[in-house]
Amino acid sequence: MLKYQEAAKEFDLNKAAAQLLSGSLDALNACYECCDRHAASDKVAIYWQGIDGRKEQYTFKQLQQRASQFANYLKSQGVQAGDRVSGLLPRTAELVITILAAWRIGAVYQPLFTAFGPKAIEHRVQLAQSKFVVTDMGNRSKLDEVADCPAIITVAAADGSGLPEGDIDFWQALDAQPEQCELTMRSINDPFLLMFTSGTTGLAKPLEVPLKALIAFGRYMQDAVGLAEDDSFWNIADPGWAYGLYYAITGPLLLGHATLFYEGGFSIDSFCQIVQDYQITNLAGAPTAYRMMMAADQQKMAALHGQFRRVSSAGEPLNPEVIRWFDQLLDAPIYDHYGQTEVGMVVCNHHGLQHAIRAGAAGFASPGYKIAVIDAQGNALAEDTPGILAIDLKQSPMMWFGGYKESRKSPFVGDYYLTGDTAEIHADGSMSFVGRSDDVITTSGYRIGPFDVESALLEHDAVIEAAVVGVPDPERTEVVKAFIILAKGLEPTAHLAEELSQFVKKRLSAHAYPRLVEFVAELPKTPSGKIQRFLLRNQEISKQQGAGSAI
């Protein structure tokens, strides 16, 4: 195994590109890199299992044919290089076909999480100016409430029954097209994904992911996930979000490695069945799932002892007890990884590189990145001193993020990209995560911007003002809590609190709604009128600490 220090010191972007990509930096196509070049044999690209237990598999060759057909349809409808195609689909073959088809003609894929409500969908497709939204019957009704919704392509029943009037039948449109479609070549800096990331002062912000990121995604799979050719790999993250889209679809397919899709949500029963049926050896996901495993029947979990060669965790810091449990009960090494939608994974305990594992540390900067901890003025801080975690742009040839498309606030200060997280770097170069330096909420591995939730609450007639914070929670890291000022004459009741929670859940998202609601007479504000969420958050932390000391 290559030593980390050697890999970091010897990293060369051009060599990494030559190793991972077949195209030149001026003539690349993501569909070719992630599909076509692996299609010569009958190599499996996707193992799929439905909620009902049905199992299917798709080869790279099959995906190439189907993606070509759908790409031909998109071209026939005027979709060109740089145009956006949105996908509101669960983990199905149609999702991958949609992504690959968009890439094939140089278009940009924009993911929509299937738990999103109409408000979150509308914001994204309008800013993306999407030409099409591809969805299925299970999610189709959400689009009825989306203003100025793009044309809709729906995966309908085999006989086309139930297809809403005006929708395009996915398979009917695809089957009518030829099986060959010419590739549209793009340059290394052209976008192939359009992502959205939560902020504290506005709705989710769009950012383009250029083809250069393919190099970073591939290296993460090799260096950090340690994906080996004989691994059976499963990333349980949802591809509606960055970790799933980057590393459950793009990363493994880029390496010509099969990935696994389970259509349903996470449950212990389905997890154990899939791990045993597919003999999963390399697992990736968020700590929430791992904590659910710890809370499950230990005899059932013990049956998986020795099954996993490598386990990767991302989205929030790993608790020490999770690491101990994996070691003692499963005999599996679980490593912490740190990243963001904006930059991918940049600090990792690497399964594929040899270095010391420091307890409580997220690891070392991925080869091709240089991290620093700085103060608000952009000055580097001494080791073991908490500050803003930053990426040194001049010393990070792998860096691909160039800024948000719709935001006045720049995440760059001098030669640094600011992550918005507080961390400290130790003498050996490893990094420990301290916490968020802004108001973004982390719950079950998802990052939620309070502004999104507050905006949804304010659409309800009962709400005059709202402030949303994250409250510490042992299972989810944080849960969303809303502080509400009601309209005059309304009484605060448990029924109204539940009504407001469900209102946000339906309008915004099934994961970004307030599980806790407190009605208040006023909110803490600055002299200029800005809500001071940190005071509310500190208040909740103090309450919990007080309750703990009383026990």
Image (spheres, helix red, strand yellow):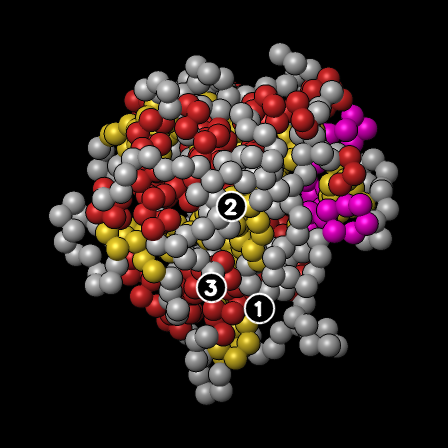
Magenta stretch bounds: 412-435
Say which residue label 1 marks. Answer: 467
Residue 418 shown in magenta: yes
Residue appearing at x 44%, y 18% in the figure: 231
Magenta segment main secondary structure: strand
One can see residue 412 in this view? yes
What residue is rendered at 61% in x and 23% in y?
18
Q: Earlier in the sequence, mark 1 or mark 3?
A: 3
Q: Are marks 1 and 3 in contact (CB under 8 Å)?
A: no
Residue drawn 26% across and 55% down? 168
- Quick one: label 3, few (<14), some, or many (20+) residues within 10 Å? some
- Residue 126 circle label: 3
* Along the viewing direction, whichever of 260 and 249 lies nearer the viewer: 249
Name the amino acid, label 2.
Leu
Report the Cα–Cα distance between label 1 and label 2: 32 Å
Q: Amino acid at mark 3?
A: Gln
- Whether tag 2 and tag 3 are in contact, CB under 8 A, the answer is no
Rendered image quadrant of residue 61: top left
The residues bearing labels 2 and 3 have C-alpha atoms spaced at a distance of 16 Å
Q: Is residue 340 visible?
A: no
- Point out residue 311 in the picture as x, y percentages from the top left corner: 50, 25
Image x and y of residue 53, in percent: 23, 33
Q: Which residue is mark 2?
A: 193
Secondary structure of residue under mark 3: helix
Viewer-nearest of discs 1 and 2: 2
Q: Secondary structure at mark 2?
A: strand
